[in-house]
Image (cartoon, coloured by chain):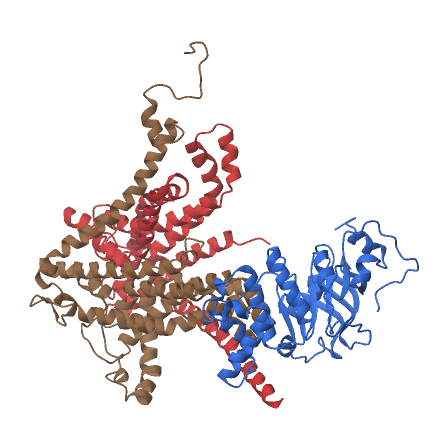
Amino acid sequence: MPTLRHVDRMRRITSGVMTTTTALCTLLAVGILLVILSYIAWQGIGSLSFRFLIDSPRPVGEGGGIGNAILGSVVLLGLSSAFGLPLGISVGIFLAEVGTGRLVGLVRFIVDTLTGIPSIVTGVFIYAVLVLPMKQFSAFAGGVALALIMIPIVARTTEEMLKLVPHSLREGALALGAPQWRVTLGVVLPAAASGIATGAMLAIARVSGETAPLLFTAFGSRFFSHYLDQPIASLTVQIYNYAISPYDEWHAQAWAATLVLMTLILGINIIVRFLTRKRF
Amino acid sequence: MSGVMMTKTPVQIPAPKIEVRERRHDASTPQREAAKTKVAVRELNFFYGRSQALHNISIDIPERIVMAFIGPSGCGKSTFLRTLNRMNDVIPATRVEGQVMIDDRDIYAAGTDVVDLRRKVGMVFQKSNPFPKSIFDNVAYGLRINRLTKSGSELTDRVEEALKDAALWTEVKDRLKTSALSLSGGQQQRLCIARALAIRPEVLLMDEPASALDPIATSKIEELVFDLKKQYTIVIVTHNMQQAARVSDTTAFFLLGKLIEVNSTEKMFTAPNEKLTEDYITGRFG
Amino acid sequence: MSATTSNNLTVKGKHSDWRRVLSPTGNTGDAIFRVVMLAMGLFVVAVVIAMVVALASDSMLSVRRFGFAFLTGRQWNPIKGEFGALPFIYGTLVSSLIALLISVPLSLGIAVFLVEQAPHYIARPVGFLVELLAAIPSVVYGLWGIFVLAPFLRVHVEPPLAHWLGWLPLFQGSITGIGLLTGGIILAIMVTPIISAIVRDVLAAVSGSQREAALALGATKWEMIRVVLVNGAPGIAGAVILGLGRALGETMAVTMVIGNRPQISASLFEPSYTIASAIANEFTEATENLYLSALVELGLILFLVTFIVNGIARLLVWNVTRKTGGVGRAA
């Protein structure tokens, strides 16, 4: 029947067109990624220098660098990890091992809520409870804000990694007379350690790119600082400030700072991906 | 028939476990020695990657009969069934050598229209897999995508016909628009049969269609198969020898990817030609 | 009373009571451990409750002053003390809508390609690359947006749009490259890796027998894919809503390319303002209590909206969660 053949050809053409379209969509996404990354590399490499990495910002025309911002970011990451990792891992342990019944449901719901809160709102909250009473911006406030962002991420990965540990491992230890806490801390946690570690690394990568919550907690600074009760610079805020400034020189520095930041973030992501690749 | 070695002495089988029961004889089941061959397979070899799953299978399947494929788990009967409508194409790294001729055309020849092939050779799977749509839309699916009907009323008629052929119509005629997933397991399987029948295939392949069902649902399916053979060539894979005995006209016994024997069902279960067949049927292995 | 045999299996005396209550084993270490873990869990709960309380109380001033009119007021004038949030609500909604209009088809295409079409050795690395888009910080997207995307749109995209579709009020007005359209496009790029990642999981979870059923009835590849999409529909809906939730809360990238002008205009080329951008820009300049309170009220609105949206999304995507902590994204 000639009609059936024609219909079939249309179906086949449609199928071909659609499958090509999906391939193009993927190509577009990957293309955009490569465009962005190559722009960062191309624009950033020009202003990158050893001095750039060490100096603090200077007025336009005098060079300067992001040294204080790098230090600031390190301090903030350290602070947020110091709060966020133990708390996040503990909550993960609670959800996977300790919690019972409705309490687990409540905590998990809260953790999920925390994940979805826009980071700027977290910043507003910390401003209200830390910055206002202390009457100043501080690295401490910034660290706490970042910790709040880190906690749900770490808690969720920890919970999932702990759940992956086979029950037989737990039962073996329990049968030898070990108390529950020993089993959890000494047997289950080490077994899940690599997964938890990669989760922590990804959380750090994620948090290192945060800007909004720092805008009114750590605020930013043009000087080197390591005092926790003073405002402190960070890579992200610095990039933001330079980007919206009217000066070309600062724009160039923004690109270079972005290059530094992206190297860190991409580096962590690629390492994690490498570590978690499935062996066939 | 090729692939079968003839031995001279008939075999003595002590206390056969399988009874070829009295089947309903009506005008449609007289002897059919001169039946036309619908599917002719010649020296088919099938490979999953490097391992060979089917060895040199050759068999003729006449039209409008029910042929059962039996054999222990892993013997290749399902794999062979799936070569008949090229469903194995979707599995990566598979390779086919040999010929499968349906109506004297090799379906593995270059340029074969696979979509058209699957219209002619329908399949019912082991576990029922209705789409998450209404009962009506499930049965109408094949008709719609293949544009087989010209009007809404024609579509409705075809759906009703298919549901009647699958002995499901009376149970669902008042709720055609409800979800197919609300049916029982046995009903879902009959729905899948209706769905396959709606596009009027010439051959119907059934891969252990009743293995997931309770005995009552199973017997309904078996009755259905018996009725369907008036119009369709049916190949049914089953691990249940009693089922094969109840339902089929011809039986083929597979073992380790080879076709051991093809015979009329009655002979297969009372006086098979091959010792291996006899051993399997009497339960010495498998 | 057996005085001779000491039964080590029972925890003796009254001292066991508190331990028994806290831990089913009655072991001291267990009791302490459980208390500590419980405390951590409850601490997180307390933090979130505190957040709601703080937001609510600090916005009280503004709420009492403006009431419901806050949501409908069109004027945002810090000098005069008039605060109406409608321009921000408008900007947030429209930019997110544009983002979804662009991102959802794109994400579906990517997910379908990676799950149904691409062979395994392509799907894994390409999937990783798409996920990397989510790892780029918001401020970096903003930087790229200002210096690359905006000029590109201004020169190559907006003029043709104005030329061919200028009869629509959507594409009228002055072309600067900075505005609602740019904000929407940048949001689309940021949200695509998230939606496509979830849809990938959803599609991969669809049973293979559905695909086989369609193929066995003579379906073409695309027709089979449509069956898979129907199967995954609830999960896909959840993914889209999750993407919406992310788009609503995005701050830095949007603030850098949207123009930050509190106005409501039909044109997509015009600058606009979102809730998150407003907070980010003006928070440190809010000197008076009413100003600050109005900004906090904006924060409260954002919190509530994203809470509801994410809640709906979770209901739909309940079982499909991302396995790793996520190649997460910053705002």
Where is residue B42, by image quadrant? bottom right
Question: From what the image shows, is residue C262 above or below residue C3?
Answer: below
Q: Position of residue A5 (x, y in %)?
A: 60, 86
Q: Who's the residue at 41% across and 33% down the image?
A: A181
Q: Position of residue C140 (x, y in %)?
A: 34, 64
Tally of numbered discs: 0
Front one among A261 and C81? C81
Q: Who's the residue at 46% across and 62% down the image?
A: C202
Q: Position of residue B254 (x, y in %)?
A: 76, 60
Is A210 left or right of C273, judged from the image as shown?
right
Query: Can residue A46 be seen by looking at this rendering?
Result: no
Q: Who's the residue at 50% across and 32% down the image?
A: A173
Is C181 left or right of C27, judged from the image as shown?
left
Q: Who's the residue at 34% across and 74% down the image?
A: C149
- Chain letter of the blue region: B
Question: From what the image shows, is residue B228 above or below residue B111?
Answer: above
Task: List the single residue furthest toward the right.
Answer: B8
Is B260 left or right of B218, judged from the image as shown?
right
Is B117 left or right of A42, judged from the image as shown?
right
- Chain letter of the brown region: C
Query: Can residue B245 be seen by looking at this rendering?
Result: yes
What is the quadrant of the N terminus of chain A in the image?
bottom right
Where is residue B18, by image quadrant? bottom right
Question: From what the image shows, is residue C293 above or below residue B26?
Answer: above
- Chain letter of the red region: A
What is the quadrant of the C terminus of chain A in the image?
bottom right
Q: Position of residue C263 (x, y in %)?
A: 18, 75
Where is residue C183, by image quadrant? bottom left
Front one among A261 and C31? C31
